[in-house]
Amino acid sequence: MHNLTLGSLFDGSGGFPLGGLLSGITPVWGVSMSKLALDSFLSY
């Protein structure tokens, strides 16, 4: 079985990557104009 990864455009609050992480999918990258949103993404 392959390890799944995801990327997130317009990451916002990071809900999509967090949901993926909780489902066993590894968030690899996220894009947002908000530094706060990116800091949230990097905290995973």
Image (cartoon, grey):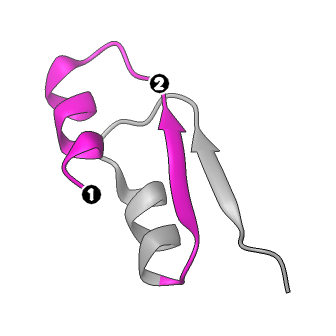
Q: Residue at 37% of width from left, 58% of height from top?
A: 15
Q: Write down the quadrant of residue 2 in the picture.
A: bottom right
Q: Position of residue 36 (x, y in %)?
A: 14, 28
Mark 2: which amino acid? Val
Residue 5 numbered tag: none
Quarter that holds the C terminus: bottom left
Residue 6 belongs to the span the image colors magenta: no
Of residues 18 and 42, which is closer to you in this image? Answer: 42
Q: Circle 2 is placed at which residue position?
A: 31
Mark 2: few, some, or many residues within 10 Å (few <14, many ≥20)? some
Check the image and report above or below for 31 versus 29. above
How far apart, in angstroms, are the residues tagged by discs 2 and 1? 14 Å
Element marked by disc 2: loop
Counting every numbered tag in the picture gives 2
Q: Which residue is mark 1?
A: 44
Q: Is residue 6 left or right of residue 35?
A: right
Q: Compared with residue 29, is residue 5 higher up or lower down, i.e. above or below?
A: below
Q: Amino acid at mark 1?
A: Tyr
Disc 1 on helix, strand or loop?
Answer: loop
Q: Which residues are magenta?
A: 23-44
Magenta span contains residue 32: yes
Q: Residue 39 vs residue 16: left or right?
A: left
Q: Is the residue marked by circle 1 packed among few (<14), some (14-19), or many (20+) residues within 10 Å?
A: few
Residue 41 lies, with reference to residue 35, above or below; the image says: below
Looking at the image, tell me whether mark 2 or mark 1 is earlier in sequence order.
Answer: 2
Out of 32 and 43, give the one closest to the viewer. Answer: 43
Q: Position of residue 13 (x, y in %)?
A: 28, 44
